[in-house]
Amino acid sequence: EMHDGLALYILGFVAGGFLSGFLSGLFNLGGIVRIPILLFLFYIFGFSDSILMHLAIGTSLALSLPSSAINFYKEYKTWKSDDERSHISAFVKGWLLVVVLGIIAGLAIVRYLPDDLLIWVFILALLFLAIQVFILRDSYSLAERFSNGITMAFAAFITGLVSTVTGLSGVLTRSVLRAFAYPWEATYAAAGSGILISVLGTLGYMVNGLWISGEPPFT
C-alpha cells in the first residue's frame, strides 16, 4: 500500500507537471496555470490546508527558474541590438532595484499571511491581468507614464511585493508597465523581474518552509 501511495503521488505530480508545462508553453501563462494545478494536487494528496497556497506558490517559482533564465537571456540578446538601450536601461535598472525591495518585503510577510488571503490576492491579480488583456488590450493606459520617480518607485515596490506573494513572476511587471504606457521597457523589465522573483522567491520560500509542518515529503 505504501508503494502504491508513493506511485500515485509521483504519477499525480508528473501528470500535473506535464499539463502545466504544456499549457504554460502553449499560452505563455506560467504561474497563472501552474499554481491552480499545484494547489489542486496538494489538496487531493491531503497536505495541510493552512499551507496549500504557500506550497503552490513556492513550488511554482522554483519550476519557473529555467523558463525565466531562458527568457532573460533571450531579451538580453535583443536588448544588446536595441538602438534605444541606453535610455531603456536607465529606467529598467531603477525599476528592478525597487522591485528587489518589494520581493524582500513580500518574503518577509508572506509566511504570516493566511492561505485564504493569498488566494484572494492571486484572484485579484488575475482579474487585473484579464481586464488588461481581454478588455482594455493595448488601446488604454491608466496614465501617460509615471509622473515622477516616487510614483515609479511605489509601483515597482508594490509590483515586486504582489508578484512574490502570488508567484506570478514577471507577468505583473509587464502588465503594470504597459498600463502606464511603457511598451518597450515592459518587455525587458519583465524579463529582469522574472529571473529576480524566481531566484529570490524560490530561496525565500524554501527558508520560510523550514519552520512549518505538514509540507510534502522531500521538501
Image (cartoon, rainbow, N blue to C red):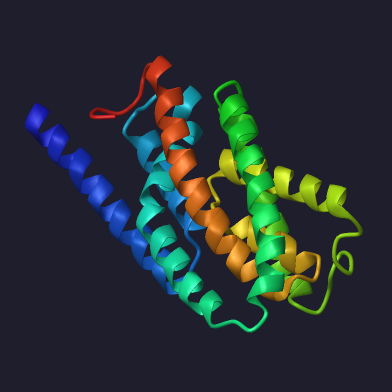
Tell me: 182 left or right of 200: right
Quarter of the image with the N terminus is: top left
| Residue 14 visible in this rendered orientation of the protein | yes
Which image quadrant is residue 216 in? Answer: top left
Instruction: Decide: is 197 above or below 4.
Output: below
Q: Looking at the image, which is closer to me, 167 or 2?
A: 167
Quarter of the image with the C terminus is: top left
The outermost residue toward the front is 86
Q: Could you tell me residue 213's position as x and y percent? A: 38, 16
Tell me: 197 left or right of 64: right
Q: Residue at 70% across / 63% down in the picture?
A: 90
Q: Could you tell me residue 102's position as x and y percent? A: 66, 39
Q: Residue at 75% across / 77% down in the picture?
A: 138
- How many numbered circles are shown? 0
Q: Residue at 59% across / 67% down in the picture?
A: 188
Q: Residue at 72% across / 62% down in the picture?
A: 91
Which image quadrant is residue 143 in? Answer: bottom right
Q: Could you tell me residue 183's position as x and y percent? A: 71, 74
Instruction: Decide: is 187 above or below 164.
Output: below
| Residue 123 visible in this rendered orientation of the protein | no
Q: Looking at the image, which is closer to me, 27 or 185?
A: 185
Instruction: Decide: is 144 above or below 204.
Output: below
Q: Could you tell me residue 17's position as x and y percent? A: 31, 54
Q: Looking at the image, which is closer to me, 96 or 126?
A: 96
